[in-house]
Structure formats: structure tokens, C-alpha cells
Amino acid sequence: MKITILNGSPKGDLSVTLQYVKYIEKKFPQHEFTTVHVASTIKKLEKQTEAFDEVIETVAKSDGVIWAFPLYVFLVHANYKRFIELIGERGAQEAFKDKYTALLATSIHFFDHTALNYMQGTCDDLHMRVTDYFSADMDDLMKANERARLLTFADHLFTSITEKRLTLRVYQPIVPTIRDYTPAHIESSLDDQGQRIVIVADTLDLEQNLGRMVERFRKLTQADVIDISALDIKGGCTGCIKCGFDNHCMYGDHDEMERTYRRIAEYDIIVFAGAIRDRYLSAQWKTFVDRRFFKTHQPQFPGKQLGYLISGPLGQLDNLREILLASAQLDRANLAGILTDEYETSTEIDQQIEAFAGNLIDCSSKHYIRPQTFLGLGGMKIFRDDVWGRLRFVFQADHRYYKKQGLYDFPQKEYRIRAKSLFLILLTKIPVVKKSIQKDLKIHMIGAHQKVLRDKE
Ligand SMILES: Cc1cc2nc3c(=O)[nH]c(=O)nc-3n(C[C@H](O)[C@H](O)[C@H](O)COP(=O)(O)O)c2cc1C
């Protein structure tokens, strides 16, 4: 059986994910594996069409494909995303159609599900037959039970191919619904109430809805504009994690990324603007997002108001919405709103842009930060535990930051609550007390709340 591995790590052969693939190869010597380093050679695949065609030819001739990729900032690496875009741009979908495939990811399980959802959607769009996904922690290969699990996953792919098993489709195709947006003339701009506003856009092209939305927002708010497509970006994140020690990117001052992020963070209101390509924003956008990692696991925009102007069918892409929400929460910012061009008329979009801008200014002047949901709270607990533990050696800057900002909020340190719990547990060992507590549990649960209602203003 011929299996093609599409490696999504920018580290090529030094990829952690690839070690999982190599283990599968070792245990299934009867199959022929061909690895293509898609992410680390993306420049070549973009420039030399014959190199890209060779990859597609390899896929076409194989019995199965393993998409093997690391998590990079809620998704796959920007270069892997670019490869997926190239498949569409160059009309190479046929090679993937009806091909059996499996998704193999490594990560620290921080939003691994959003990357897997994205890849599942991509495979569904390509009409591939996804047998399964496997999300390994980056260190799982050292555990015997996880290695056994990995082999079962791989075997499932090979057996499905042999037996031509039916697979499930998870995502339906995206239905195009976006109309042309033509903004009306603006009479006057809004009062920004002294809030500094910036809009960071993937494009300013007025031929596109996004460019026109950005222009309308800019005219309304007099915001400064940063055009990502005009920035000097020397390359994507290489995964070197040199930034872990002192939050400086290996590119340093050789390009504008670090400077740009530091500049953006000085504004009170930050509006990001991008157009949807496949099931995320563009690969250029993802490069911009990946390069934020010089701040590693620290919030990038604490206390700021964020907004998104999105052109495209976000209403059909809950996964992308979740990524945008989660990212804002992890940044300790307030995501005041996400506005898309999914409206029937341009007038509605005009009105929405005005309301969107007004809401951002209002929230900013009130310093309002909405409480986090599971996305921010759960994600932060993963960071906290890993930065305190196994990742501390490399991510020393995070460790210093977490200590200083009191982010090591382990419950073990809450001695008062621990003592109270111990006391109450001991009390419940007395049957009559336990019975009485159980009887009045609902009342006990709101005791402290009622005290606040009585005592506080
Ligand atoms: C820039 C960068 C971003 C990352 N983003 C995530 C992430 O969002 N979620 C996660 O669980 N792990 C994340 N990781 C951890 C990697 O996914 C993990 O170390 C993976 O095993 C690396 O695989 P590779 O060596 O094949 O590239 C990130 C690592 C880097 C360097």
C-alpha cells in the first residue's frame, strides 16, 4: 500500500510530529511511505509549479494520505494553509477526491480541536474519506499505551483502505451567499471619545468588499490603518522557539513583525479585518498570526477592545468564530464584536459598521472587559500548568510573566478554602450533620450571595 505523508511542520525532518509518523512506518514495514515536507518547502511549491505538480502526482498515485501536522496558534501552520490554498488555486482537487485519509496532529492540546475541525472541513471539501483523527500530546510517543493507540489509529486507516469502508462526512460544503457591498457617502465621523483606534487589515483593495468595509470604518472613526499586505515580512514562524527565553523573535529587526505588534498594542481599540479563504482567513493572515508567537503564551492585548471586520460566510464557520473569540479571551481583551458582510443590503452593513464602531468606543471608554468563558479559562489553565511544569526551561519569559502577574493561581495555594473544605468534610462524617447539610444545600449555596445583596451597594 502506498501512503503519502503531508508534513505540516516548518521544521521539516526535525518535526516532532514526524517522529510519530516514523513510528508508524517502523511498525508497518509492509507499506510504502513517502513523506513530503509541505510546510517547510512552501516557497518552492509556490514558485515552481513542477515541484507542486510532483507532490500532487505523489498524492494521486497513493492509496492513502496522512495529513501530519503540529498545532500552530489554534490551527495549522500558515505554510500548510497556503498549500491547501494552492490545491484550490491550481485546480488540483481531483488528486484528493475519494482518497482515504487520516489526520495526525501533535500539540499541547491547546485548541487542538479547532485545528482538527479545520482539517476535517478541508478534507470534506476535497471529498476525501477521513477514517479518523489522532491528537497526540507532543510527548505521548514516550508512553507505551499511547504508542499502542497510535498503531490502532494507523491500522484503522490501512484496514479502511483494504476493505473500502464507508466513512462519515462531518461538514457540509459552504454555500456562497455574499453580495457586493457598496457603501453610502459618510456625512460625518464619530466622536472617538479620546480612544486611539487602529485597523489592521489583510488588504485595503477597494475592489473587494473587505477593502470597502475597512475604508468605511476608517472614514467613520479616523482610525490609523496597518496594511498587512504591505508589511515587510521576511517569512513565517520557523518553530525555533528562541522567543521562549526573552520574547524576541529570531527575525529580530530584519522585518517589521515584532515592531508592528508592539505598535498595535499601544492602541485602545484594535480592529482586525480579513476575508475568509476556505475555512479560515488567508494564509498571509495566518503568517501574521503565527508571528505573534514571539510573545509566546502571554496575553498580547490585555485591557484592549478588539473587533473583527470579516468578509465571507462566517455564519457557516463556527470553528473560525470560536478561534477569534478564544484568541481575544486569551489576550485578556474584550471582543466587542465581529461584523461580516453577510447582510442582504449595503445599507444594513453601513448601519452595522456604525453601530460596531460606536460599541467599540463605548466599551473602550468604560474599560469594559466581558468575563471569560470556558475558552479563555480552560485555555489558560493548560498554559499555566505547562509553563509552570515541563515547558518552563524553554519558556522562561512566560514563567517570569506568570509569576509577576499572579497567573499561577493553583487552587492548592488557597489555604483558607482548603482548611474550610477539610473542616466541612469532617463535619459531614457525622450522619445527622450530613443529613441536615444535604437538606439545606440550596440555601447554603446562596448564603454568601445573599450577604452581598444585604451588605453591598
Ligand atoms: C509558534 C507555535 C505555535 C504553537 N501553537 C500551538 C497551539 O495553538 N496549540 C498547541 O496545543 N500547541 C501549539 N504549539 C506546540 C506545537 O504544536 C507542538 O510543540 C508540536 O508538537 C510541534 O510539532 P512539530 O515539531 O512537528 O512542528 C505551538 C508551537 C509553536 C512553536
Image: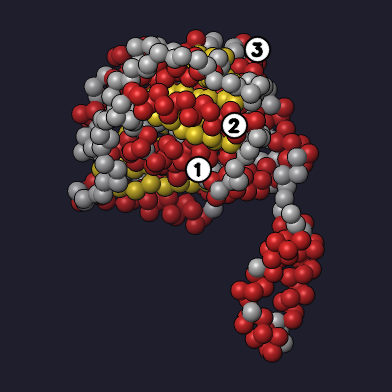
Q: Residue at x 54, y 35 (%)?
A: 335
Q: Label 3, label 2: how many angstroms apart (C-alpha)?
A: 36 Å
Q: Is mark 1 within 8 Å of ligand 1?
A: yes
Q: Is residue 265 left or right of residue 95?
A: right
Q: Amino acid at mark 1?
A: Phe
**Any mark on residue 362, and which?**
2
The residue singled out by tag 3 in the image is 253
Instruction: Label 1: state its secondary structure.
Output: loop
Q: Is residue 27 left or right of residue 227?
A: left
- The C terminus is located in which quarter? bottom right
Q: Is residue 142 visible?
A: no
Q: Label 1, label 3: how many angstroms apart (C-alpha)?
A: 30 Å
Could you tell me residue 55's position as x and y percent? 31, 24
1 and 3 marks in contact (CB < 8 Å): no
Q: Is residue 194 visible?
A: yes
The residue singled out by tag 1 in the image is 111
Could you tell me residue 270's position as x and y percent? 57, 25
- The N terminus is located in which quarter? top left
Instruction: Label 3: state its secondary structure.
Output: helix
Q: Amino acid at mark 2?
A: Asp
**Any mark on residue 34, and which?**
none
Q: Earlier in the sequence, mark 3 or mark 2?
A: 3
Q: Is residue 176 above or below residue 326?
A: above
Query: In the rendered view, how is the structure colored?
Result: secondary structure
Instruction: Label 2: state its secondary structure.
Output: helix
Q: Residue at x 74, y 36 (%)?
A: 401
Q: Amino acid at mark 3?
A: Asp
Dot 1 crowding, Cα within 10 Å, few <14, some 14–19, many 20+: many
Is 327 or 268 nearer to us in this picture? 268
